[in-house]
Amino acid sequence: CRWECWEGDLGGWERRGDVGAQLAERLNEYLESPGLESEVARQFEQVAGRSQASAIQPLGPVFNFFIQDARRFMDEVGLRTELCILRPEDAEAVLEGADSDGSGTLSLEQFWSALSSAIGAWTMDSGLKLARAEWEREVQQQH
């Protein structure tokens, strides 16, 4: 699933729609980067062992590792976001939301879906919020 920024998301702030488009473009670049999914799979399998699913708690550090990795990527490409590692219980809460059958475990697909959705939503929300705050400061300084 690719990320896009719709004009409506900006709430009348269309003039700066380029920020949203840039965030979406970089986000897709990160999520589709070669080797990312296989590295996620490798780390997932280290936790899950031979089984097809893993308990949620040990996946928290893996989740945070990739949140940190995404943050590093966004910093390197010069985009400001508020991506940050979560407390273990918060990471678990996000992952529990992906446990659609209530089994207390996640498959690799469920884990990847939760991870990529979280990175995507937080990047877009915080990136647009920071850019909008900056734009509002500029407008105030002009008056």
Image (spheres, rainbow, N blue to C red):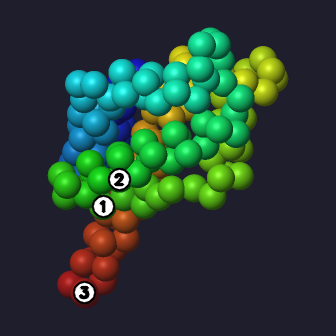
Q: In the image, which disc is placed on residue 80?
A: 1
- Cα gap from disc 3 to disc 1, whole angstroms: 21 Å
Earlier residue among tags 3 and 2: 2
Q: Secondary structure at mark 1?
A: loop
| Residue for point 66% across, 24% down | 54
The residue where tag 2 is placed is 71
Residue drawn where x is 30% and y is 53% of the image: 72
Measuring from the top left, give residue 123's x and y in whole percent.
40, 48
Q: Residue at x 71, y 44 (%)?
A: 93
Relative vertical location of residue 121 with respect to residue 78 in this rendering, above or below: above
Rendering quarter of residue 76: bottom left
- Between disc 1 and disc 2, the foreground one is 2
> Residue flagged by tag 1: what amino acid is it?
Arg
Q: Nearer the viewer, residue 83 or 85?
A: 85
Residue 32: image location, x then y, percent: 28, 26
- Amino acid carrying mark 2 in the image: Arg
21 or 65: nearer the viewer = 65
